[in-house]
Image (cartoon, rainbow, N blue to C red):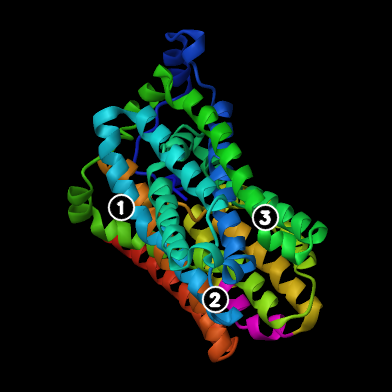
């Protein structure tokens, strides 16, 4: 998800006092005033709706798509093909960011956000109406791919600057706390999506679920998108929101110029959170696929364990704000990367350890994910000059998702199926190593500069 500026001394901007902000607010009419609590609510609602769409598709890629779109393949190969299409959104997302930044420069924030969220809703709801391979043949796979690309473009375009605005207007000693609020959307979205799929699997026959039941979560996703659209437009259409963004210079800039002058910061920022993004899919999507293929345990029961894990992740995200405000965001992120590296050594033992081992991996993995992901967004984006922070934060997030998470389910399942779970350990360990190296490099460059 879009990134937020970093903690304490890692910020590059100078912060006006809260009194000056309050005074400026008082010059506006009541209907255009935005309280910090409203910004926080807008951030959480917006991110939760996006993550719900995200997890509905991810779970369907494991539980539905291999059977309804790839029935001509064995279950493993069908799941791998579904994960290939899953990655298309991450490939498309940076292009969506660049395209919608241009739309914002020409037509404004409201037009950009409305178009992006309608595209996201249409792409998601369109999947609910897709004919299966049995009815449309390979054309159904092409349509699924196009709709998945539409989701990615829309997610790139839905960056509204709210997380950055919230973090920049936070008290100096509470920036870690405010930065984690947007990250709460991930566990909330997973809990709703996982609970919904668990309910459907428990109450429908396999035939009914694969015939029509799987389509219901995509309808729900469209309805949630409509609610989220109005909640976010309530904020971005106000004069106060525009003024605050202008004060912080949170405006789109030319992506080519930004990449040419700030490419180093984009790359370091993306790699710094790689451990968190790699772990993201290794405790959500990959275990679901592995259990579906290689375990006899109930899928609905396993989803409920993951929902419990997501609740623990939410607590971890909240705790990360307190920890980061005490010790610093980079220190928090580096410590979590080291703990993720430690967890990677136990992946084969836990996933092969029966229900108890699998449950321990899921619950412990979600806790670590919450602690790391809570501060993963933009830990080093303060390196961007103010002029480039808005676009730089969005592209850094896009690259983090692409490199760290976009291909994680495909790679992890392919490696574990053909070479064993030990290779999943190496994959996760490599992400942790990249994070630690990027954080060290960022610190060294900051000292040198």
Mark 3 closeness class: few <14, some 14–19, many ≥20 residues within 10 Å: few
Q: Secondary structure at mark 3?
A: loop
Mark 2 vs mark 1, foreground winner is: 2
The spot of residue 88 in percent (x, y) is 41, 62
Q: Residues within 10 Å of mark 1 (few under 14, many from 20)?
A: some
Magenta stretch prevailing secondary structure = helix
Q: CA distance from mark 3 to mark 1?
A: 33 Å
Residue 14 x, y percent position in the rendering = 35, 35
- Residue 190: x and y in percent read 64, 54
Position of 311 with respect to 183 (left or right) is: right
Instruction: Kindly indicate whether the residue at mark 1 contacts the one at mark 2 (C-beta within 8 angstroms).
Output: no
- Among the two numbered marks 2 and 1 on one chain, the one whose residue lies closer to the N terminus: 2
Q: Secondary structure at mark 1?
A: helix
Query: Is residue 447 shown above or below 153?
Result: below
In magenta segment, residue 293: no
| Residue stretch in magenta | 340-352
Residue 347 included in the magenta stretch of the image: yes
Whole-angstrom CA distance, mark 2 to mark 1, is 28 Å
The answer to which image quadrant residue 65 occupies is bottom right
At x 58%, y 71%, the residue is 66
- Asked whether 313 or 76 is in front, the reply is 76
Crowd class of label 2 (few under 14; some 14 to 19; many from 20; radius 10 Å): many
- Decide if residue 109 is in sight here: yes
Which residue, given by chain and number where applicable, does mark 2 sit on? 78
Image point 32% across, 62% down: which residue?
267
Q: Which residue is identified by label 3?
A: 212
Which residue is tagged 1? Answer: 95
Q: Residue at x 50, y 21 (%)?
A: 34
Foreground: 268 or 306?
306
Q: Depth check: 236 or 230 in front?
A: 230
Residue 308 tag number: none
Height in image: 377 above or below 437? above
């Amino acid at each position: 998800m879009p990134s937020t500026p970093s903690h304490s001394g890692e910020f590059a901007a100078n912060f006006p006092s809260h009194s000056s902000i309050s005074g400026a607010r008082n010059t506006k009419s009541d209907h255009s005033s935005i309280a910090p609590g409203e910004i926080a609510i807008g951030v959480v609602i917006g991110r939760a709706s996006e993550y719900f769409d995200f997890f509905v598709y991810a779970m369907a890629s494991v539980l539905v798509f291999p059977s309804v779109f790839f029935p001509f393949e064995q279950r493993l190969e069908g799941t791998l093909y579904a994960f290939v299409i899953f990655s298309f959104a991450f490939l498309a997302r940076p292009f969506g960011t660049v395209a919608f930044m241009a739309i914002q420069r020409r037509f404004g924030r409201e037009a950009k956000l409305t178009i992006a969220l309608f595209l996201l809703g249409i792409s998601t709801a369109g999947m609910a109406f897709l004919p299966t391979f049995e009815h449309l043949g390979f054309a159904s796979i092409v349509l699924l791919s196009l709709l998945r690309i539409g989701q990615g473009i829309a997610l790139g375009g839905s960056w509204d600057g709210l997380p950055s605005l919230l973090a920049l207007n936070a008290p100096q000693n509470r920036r870690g706390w405010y930065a984690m609020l947007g990250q709460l959307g991930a566990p909330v979205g997973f809990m709703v999506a996982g609970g919904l799929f668990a309910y459907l699997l428990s109450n429908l026959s396999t035939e009914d679920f694969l015939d029509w039941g799987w389509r219901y979560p995509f309808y729900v996703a469209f309805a949630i998108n409509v609610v989220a659209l109005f909640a976010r437009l309530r904020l971005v259409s106000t004069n106060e929101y525009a003024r605050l963004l202008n004060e912080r210079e949170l405006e789109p800039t030319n992506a080519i110029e930004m990449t040419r002058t700030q490419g180093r910061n984009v790359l370091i920022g993306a790699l710094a959170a790689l451990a968190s993004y790699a772990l993201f899919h290794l405790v959500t999507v990959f275990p679901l696929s592995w259990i579906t293929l290689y375990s006899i345990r109930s899928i609905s029961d396993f989803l409920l364990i993951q929902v419990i894990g997501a609740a623990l992740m939410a607590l971890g995200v909240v705790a990360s704000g307190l920890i980061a405000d005490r010790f610093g965001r980079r220190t928090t992120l580096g410590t979590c990367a080291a703990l993720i590296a430690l967890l990677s050594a136990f992946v084969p033992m836990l996933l092969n350890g029966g229900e108890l081992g699998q449950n321990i991996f899921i619950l412990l993995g979600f806790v670590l994910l919450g602690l790391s992901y809570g501060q993963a967004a933009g830990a080093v984006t303060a390196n961007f000059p103010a002029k480039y922070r808005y676009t730089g934060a969005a592209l850094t997030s896009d690259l983090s998702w692409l490199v760290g998470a976009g291909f994680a389910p495909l790679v992890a399942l392919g490696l574990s199926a053909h070479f064993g779970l030990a290779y999943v350990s190496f994959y996760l360990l490599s992400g942790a190593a990249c994070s630690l190296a990027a954080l060290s490099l960022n610190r060294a460059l900051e000292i040198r500069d």
